[in-house]
Image: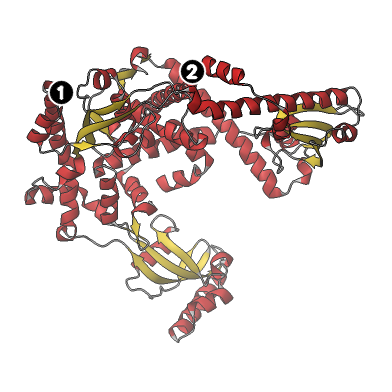
Amino acid sequence: MLLAIREHVRGWLAWIIIILIGAAFALVGLSSYMGPSGGGQVVAEVNGADITRDQLDRAFSQRRTMYEQMYQGELPRSLQDQLRRDALDELITEHLVREFVSTRGFRLSDQDLGALIRADQRFHVDGRFSPEQYRRMLSQQGFSTDRFEQMMRQQALMEQLSELFSDTALVTDRDLERAVALRHQERDLRFARISYQAYVDEVEVTDDEISEFYEQNRDEFQSTERVRVEYVMLERDALIEQLEISDQDIEERFERVRGRFVEEESRTARHILIRAPEGAEEERAQAREQVQELRQRIEDGESFGDLAREYSDDTGSAREGGSLGRVERGLMVEPFEDALFALEDEGAMSEPVETRFGVHLIQLDRIHGGDEVSLEDVRDEVRQELAEERVERELFDRRSRLEEMAFDWADSLEPAAEELGLEIRESDWFSRQGGEGIASEEAVVRAAFGGEVLEAQQNSDVLELEGGRFVVIRIADHEPRETLALDEVRDDIEQHLRSRKAFDLARERADNVLAGLRDGGDFSELAGDAPEMELEEAGFVKRDASYPRPLLREAFRLGKPGEDEAVYGVVDLGDGSLAVLQVNAVRDGNLEELDDEAVAGERRRLRELATEASIQDFLSQLRQDADVRIHEERFL
């Protein structure tokens, strides 16, 4: 069943499958795959299927936002280009995997799909699945129920595919020993820090140096080019309430999907088990008699939970007063399940029930789901679903008309706004890195600074945004990029040159200490000759010790020291300081020193690495066998 599959691939492997090879669903939006693309240039073809510029823009925008948060600022152009290339590769990979799944017989029943959706906590209110919450959340994201369910089906099929890799990943004991020796290795470390700040007062920066740096790097001292745009927008949600849906349409739709509104029946129950082997009639008779006695005692007022804790041979549930939690059909052996689901009233108890485990007394605590739902109970929800589906046709017609009007009257948005009843809005100033509101959309930023819109001062093409929105923009105002005057950047240049010179002095000092160590000098004496250096005896450290990451990487990168000879290095710590380090000895990790939980964790980690390698091989083979054509002239 699907729930078992989800349990099997939870955690790291689920992320590999859903993010690595299913990323396009999260990054570019379902509508790009499940319906008309809304136009856009084709940037790549994968076995005859198109990947459009709109899809790529959305995927890239997500990546860029994440990296901008990491870098806390604007990304270098070279990194943006690489992120865009990575986003396209991800879209190609996702398409190939979906194609593989669909042609290899992977299937998901409607029953399992319904269970998957009902189990999603995002759609729960007060601990239960809420159709209203389900519809509301999908509407907020611009999804119809049919499209969302297609997405969930596709994602579940990819999880099934992941089992093929996780089940074949093997880890030998020798692999485990080698991995532990390396990962749990310790190194005897001492190091001395030296900061460029110690030398800032010793350096001078002349006016000639400032001027020379300015002239050589004028392109770095530019004002930010900015624009403001005016735009009109078609919004899917704004059209939904305007559609007329007939009662007959609602009734037909309800009959088709009524199963989705009925939660599969389950029951909360508890039991007492008296064990008795199959075929041992005397023991079975005694067990039946004891169960009858316990049943009578409960009817006379004693607590089921107390008696379960005292008498039940099912030690796991006995500790919980016999509680089995929530039970669905198919989870228990047939005689037990038949007896439980035959009970009609909450609190009712069964007669003695015999299974291969012994004799049970079952009490029904609560019945969940299974109730029929009338059309009147869900009429509004069904109407909303139909409207969400039919709005696509209306939205497509209006989008087509907007495209025609924006092209025919390329120097104004007013004709399109008047005919379609749209408001002409205006953005704040934004740069090529985007801004707030409409300027946070990658497609808008790209169009605003494109030649047709910025240079020719014409309307843009219709741009498709997330959430069923379509927009046409034109330039309202433009501030071009200009070179800043030297006086505006003098202080920044001076600070930069001073820091660079000071760092060079710190590096020279660190190199001198390193040379002294390699010539047989004493670390304490060499550091003592430079009071700006701080010597620290770290002792044996692991890879995850609480020291700067560059320091630890260098310490474990250096070769192993000889029996009476240390190894040395210098590393930039990335915070304006350097470290001279000495590794005196190496101690490999020992599998026997780890507890069972740590060993299991190491074995699991190696299995995940082996699984990842299998997945990467699989993806590489898919790509190699595919017909992929990338239109480089449309890529950037």
Compared with residue 403, is residue 113 higher up or lower down, i.e. above or below?
A: below
Measure the C-alpha gap from mark 1 to mark 2. 36 Å
Q: Which residue is mark 2?
A: 218
Position of residue 410 in the picture relative to residue 530 (left or right): left
For this rendering, which residue is in front, 630 or 529? 529
| Label 2 element class | helix
Q: Which residue is mark 1?
A: 411
Q: Residue furthest bottom?
A: 300
Q: Quadrant of the C terminus?
A: top left
Residue 125: x and y in percent read: 34, 60
Residue 412: x and y in percent read: 14, 27
Q: Is residue 188 visible in the rendered structure shown here?
A: no
| Label 1 element class | loop
Q: Is residue 235 visible in the rendered structure shown here?
A: yes
- The amino acid marked with disc number 2 is Arg
| The quarter of the displayed image where residue 127 is located | bottom left
